[in-house]
Amino acid sequence: METVTRASLIEQIYQQVGLSRKESSVLLEDVLETVMQALERGESVKISGFGTFSVRKKGQRCGRNPKTGEEVPILPRSVLVFRSSQLLRGEVNHEETEPGVEYDD
C-alpha cells in the first residue's frame, strides 16, 4: 500500500493540470496553508465530495496511568476531526451511487 505524499500530490498536479513542478508546489502549499489557517481559527473546512475538517474542543477529564493506576488530569485540548462525505465513503467501499443524486456531506 502506498502513501500519498506532498511530492506525489505535486507530481499529480504537474501531470494533470500542466503547471510547472514549481508552480504545482506553490499551489499545493497555498491550499494546505489556507486549510491550516482556517482550522487554527476554529473554522470548519468543507471540501464538497470529499469531507469536512473541523476542530473539536475537549474539556479536562480524569485519566488513569495504566502502569500505576494513579489518576491523572488530562488537560483541555483541541483535536482535529475529519468526517468523510457520503460520496467518498461510497468510493472507498466501492458502492454504486445513483447518477444525478447530490449528497450534502
Image (tube, rainbow, N blue to C red):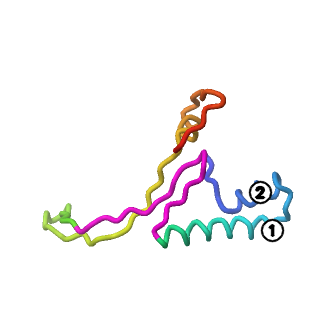
Instruction: Point out residue 2 in the picture as x, y percentages from the top left corner.
Output: 63, 49
Q: Earlier in the sequence, mark 1 or mark 2?
A: 2
Is residue 9 highlighted in magenta?
no
Q: How many marks?
A: 2
Mark 2 residue type: Ile
Name the residue carrying label 1. Answer: 23
The secondary structure type at the circle numbered 2 is helix
Q: Residue visible at 56% across and 39% down?
A: 103
Q: In this view, does 87 lie to the left or right of 30?
A: left
24 lies above or below 85: below
Is residue 56 highlighted in magenta?
yes
59 lies above or below 51: below
71 lies above or below 90: below
What is the span of residues highlighted in magenta in the rendered image?
Answer: 42-60
Q: In which quarter of the image is the N terminus?
A: top right
Residue nearest the observer in this picture, 15 or 44: 44
Q: Residue visible at 84% across and 62% down?
A: 19
Q: Residue 13, labelled with which disc? A: 2
Instruction: Point out residue 12 in the picture as x, y percentages from the top left corner.
Output: 76, 54
Q: Residue 47, labelled with which disc? A: none
Mark 1 residue type: Glu
Q: Residue visible at 59% across and 53% down?
A: 47
Instruction: Point out residue 74 in the picture as x, y percentages from the top left corner.
Output: 24, 69
**Where is residue 65, by image quadrant?**
bottom left
Inter-mark Cα distance, 1 to 2: 9 Å
* Dot 2 crowding, Cα within 10 Å, few <14, some 14–19, many 20+: some
* Dot 1 crowding, Cα within 10 Å, few <14, some 14–19, many 20+: some
Residue nearest the observer in this picture, 8 or 76: 76
